[in-house]
Image (cartoon, grey):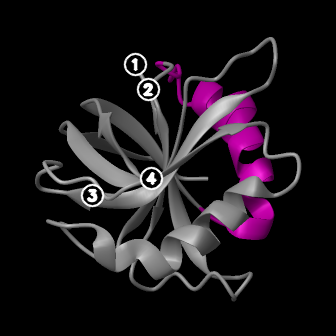
Amino acid sequence: MEIKIVERSTFTVVGLKYRGKNENNEIPQLWQVLDPRTGEIEKMVDDTAAYGISANMDMESGEFDYVAGFEVSSAEEVPEGMIAFEVPAARYAVFSTTLPKIGETFHNAYHTWLPEAGLEPSGGPELELYGEQFNPADPSSVFDLYIPVK
């Protein structure tokens, strides 16, 4: 697997937050709740690029925060029930994958591809970037995983 390295400046995502282990497919359900509310998000940078952000992993309990949302140019007005999440500037290793292969891709990235490339995870938020051509109804639809690296 070829690793693409990109640098991202700090940016803000507005959307819905879940905290847990995703044991009952809460994350896909979060996206279903967000979809009809997308129009409420003001100052969106690109309404065809949605972000899934995983952060604040508790290794003991297995719980983590997950934010489903869109990048905004300003988070002055956050819709009721949503949050603004600031993604810190970082250097990322980027991997393309599909929804059915997301777990396998994360595993291979952390246990094979990053070590082979001499890269170490930095521990910051991981990003899923669902671009214009992503179709959640198509299991072969591709999106990108961004893993922050040192």
Badge count: 4
Q: In the image, which disc is placed on residue 71?
A: 3
Q: Residues within 10 Å of mark 2 (few under 14, many from 20)?
A: some
Residue type pointed to by label 3: Glu
Q: In the image, which disc is placed on residue 150?
A: 1
- The residue that label 2 is drawn on is 149
| Residue 99 lies in the magenta-colored region | yes
Q: Which residues are magenta?
A: 97-122
Q: Residues within 10 Å of mark 4 (few under 14, many from 20)?
A: few
Foreground tag (2 vs 4): 4
Q: In the image, which disc is placed on residue 81?
A: 4
Residue type pointed to by label 1: Lys
Q: Residues within 10 Å of mark 1 (few under 14, many from 20)?
A: few
Spatial CA distance of label 3 from label 4 is 17 Å
Q: Work out whether 123 lies above or below 146.
A: above
Q: Residue shown at 30%/30% (left/top)?
A: 90
Classified by dominant secondary structure, the portion drawn in magenta counts as helix
Q: Quadrant of residue 97?
A: bottom right
